[in-house]
């Protein structure tokens, strides 16, 4: 094992596209678990562009991460909501929908919830 690992998400171990070309998830498999960079395009919404892949009524992944750029609204199943933007830390429990706000992509890093995120059934 080396003391330093440096990887680029541009050469990720896996890329998972979202429905309708509305973005992608790039996954790097690190020694401590998968880390993901998601690029959510304007118009992306979990319930439209990931729900058909996940097969659940709402997102059941927990997310602990950082918003690099853009803005997103997250609404929990119980109605609690928050807007996340560039520079924000996030800790979102399972059971939510989310969508991009505005005309620029939302880019987020997540070191908890992207391991099984947007994995197509049978993959």
Image (tube, rainbow, N blue to C red):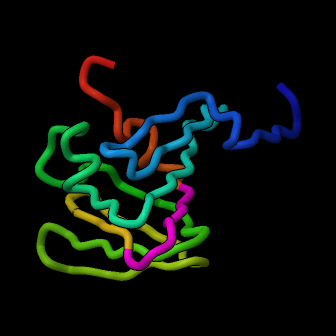
Quadrant showing the N terminus: top right
Tell me what residue is drawn at x 57 percent, y 77 percent: 86
Counting from the top left corner in percent of width and height, residue 46 is at: 27, 56
Q: In the figure, is residue 115 to the left or right of 88?
A: left
Q: How many marks?
A: 0
**67 to 85, vertically: above or below:** above
Q: Classify residue 17 by image quadrant.
A: top left
Counting from the top left corner in percent of width and height, residue 21 is at: 39, 46
Q: What span is in magenta?
A: 101-109
Q: Nearer the viewer, residue 72 or 94?
A: 72
Quadrant showing the C terminus: top left
Counting from the top left corner in percent of width and height, residue 18 is at: 37, 43
Q: In the figure, is residue 67 to the left or right of 62?
A: right
**60 to 68, vertically: above or below:** above
Q: In the figure, is residue 93 to the left or right of 23?
A: left
Q: Nearer the viewer, residue 101 or 115?
A: 101
Counting from the top left corner in percent of width and height, residue 106 is at: 49, 66
Tell me what residue is drawn at x 61 percent, y 28 percent: 13
Residue 107 on the magenta segment: yes
Outermost residue toward the top in this view: 122
Q: In the figure, is residue 108 to the left or right of 81?
A: right
Residue 32 on the magenta segment: no
Q: Classify residue 87 by image quadrant.
A: bottom right
Tell me what residue is drawn at x 35 percent, y 54 percent: 62
């Amino acid at each position: 094992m080396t003391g330093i690992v440096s990887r680029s998400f541009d050469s990720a171990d896996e890329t998972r596209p979202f429905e309708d070309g509305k973005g992608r998830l790039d996954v790097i498999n690190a020694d401590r678990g998968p880390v993901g960079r998601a690029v959510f395009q304007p118009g992306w919404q979990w319930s439209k562009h990931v729900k058909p892949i996940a097969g659940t009524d709402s997102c059941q992944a927990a997310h602990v991460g950082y918003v690099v750029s853009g803005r997103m609204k997250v609404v929990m199943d119980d109605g609690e909501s928050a807007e996340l933007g560039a520079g924000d830390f996030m800790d979102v429990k399972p059971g939510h929908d989310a969508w991009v706000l505005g005309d620029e992509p939302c880019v987020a890093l997540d070191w908890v919830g992207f391991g099984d995120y947007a994995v197509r059934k049978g993959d």
